């Protein structure tokens, strides 16, 4: 028996409503996806205490490249890493231990062309520092020291052996210090910055799922339309 015109119209209305609801649900899930990304990015952008992001035992991958801060006092056991280039000039990275409450943080205070520059003098008294967390250099970790006895790689084992204390598993590339010191040290650009957060695939999958449901609604509607035309054709042939 042929599907009546009124029933066909009703099925069309139902298809419109159902597909619209599916699209709305998919759009809502997509917004949830964007909100999750925004929240994660905001969380990563917020500075964190160095000792909360890394300790002597390790660090979560998400800590690499994060903005971080610490307070304490520098220890006069400075290490020069070099030669390192900056704007085409050869110089040295200046690493200084910062003794915080219960931890020693390796602070890459900056770059200097001359190790005898007054700017390399270790500041006295309490300081507050902020910067970017970076991993130690593991490539060429067994590379020998320079003829002057300086390290050529920012190697955590070598630094710990020289300073005689364990250090946090990430170093801090200095951006700001309070109180500030002489301006002879030039800032070092972090090699690793906070990457984008993992994409929330679950919410995205739900988005696609609802859009697929919307499309499937019209596939079903089309199948009903074809069936209706066949029923009408069969009824007409029987009538004749």
Image: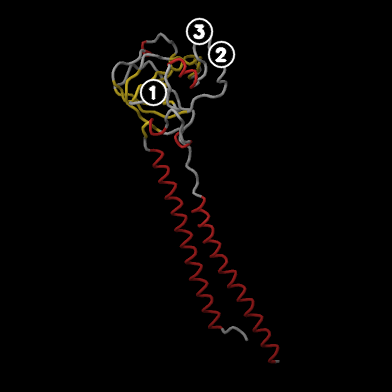
Give the residue number, with chain letter if any, for mark 1. 104
> Which corner quadrant of the image does residue 74 belong to?
top left
Image quadrant holding the N terminus, namely bottom right
Q: Which mark is residue 144?
A: 2
Query: What distance separates the C-alpha of mark 2 from that of mark 1?
Result: 25 Å
Q: Position of residue 43 (x, y in %)?
A: 39, 41
Q: Position of residue 55 (x, y in %)?
A: 42, 30
Give the residue number, with chain letter if any, for mark 3. 148
Sequence order check, earlier mark of 3 and 1: 1
79 to 227, vertically: above or below: above
76 to 60, vertically: above or below: above
Q: Which mark is residue 13?
A: none
Q: Residues within 10 Å of mark 2 (few under 14, many from 20)?
A: few
In depth, the one of 47 and 112 nearer the eye is: 47
Looking at the rendered structure, the secondary structure element under dot 2 is loop
Sequence order check, earlier mark of 2 and 1: 1
User: Which circle, 2 or 3, is nearer the viewer?
Assistant: 2
User: Which circle, 3 or 1, is nearer the viewer?
Assistant: 1
């Amino acid at each position: 028996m042929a599907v009546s015109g009124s029933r066909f119209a009703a099925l069309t209305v139902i298809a419109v409503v159902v597909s619209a609801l599916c699209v709305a649900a998919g759009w809502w899930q997509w917004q949830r996806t964007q909100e999750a990304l925004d929240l994660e990015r905001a969380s990563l952008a917020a500075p964190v205490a160095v000792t909360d992001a890394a300790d002597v035992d390790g660090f979560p991958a998400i800590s690499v490249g994060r903005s971080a801060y610490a307070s304490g006092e520098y220890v006069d056991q400075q290490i020069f890493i070099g030669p390192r280039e900056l704007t085409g000039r050869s110089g040295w990275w200046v690493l200084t231990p910062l003794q915080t409450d219960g931890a020693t943080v390796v602070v890459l205070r900056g770059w200097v062309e001359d190790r005898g520059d007054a700017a390399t003098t270790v500041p006295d008294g309490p300081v507050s520092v902020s910067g970017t967390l970076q991993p130690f250099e593991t490539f060429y970790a067994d590379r020998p020291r320079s003829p002057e006895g300086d390290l050529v790689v920012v190697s955590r084992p070598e630094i710990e052996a020289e300073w005689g204390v364990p250090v946090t598993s990430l170093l801090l590339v200095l951006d700001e210090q309070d109180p500030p010191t002489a301006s002879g040290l030039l800032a070092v650009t972090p090699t690793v910055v906070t990457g984008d957060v993992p994409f929330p695939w679950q919410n995205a999958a739900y988005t696609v799922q609802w859009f697929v449901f919307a499309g499937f609604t019209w596939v079903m509607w089309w199948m009903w339309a074809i069936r209706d035309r066949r029923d009408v054709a069969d009824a007409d042939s029987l009538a004749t």
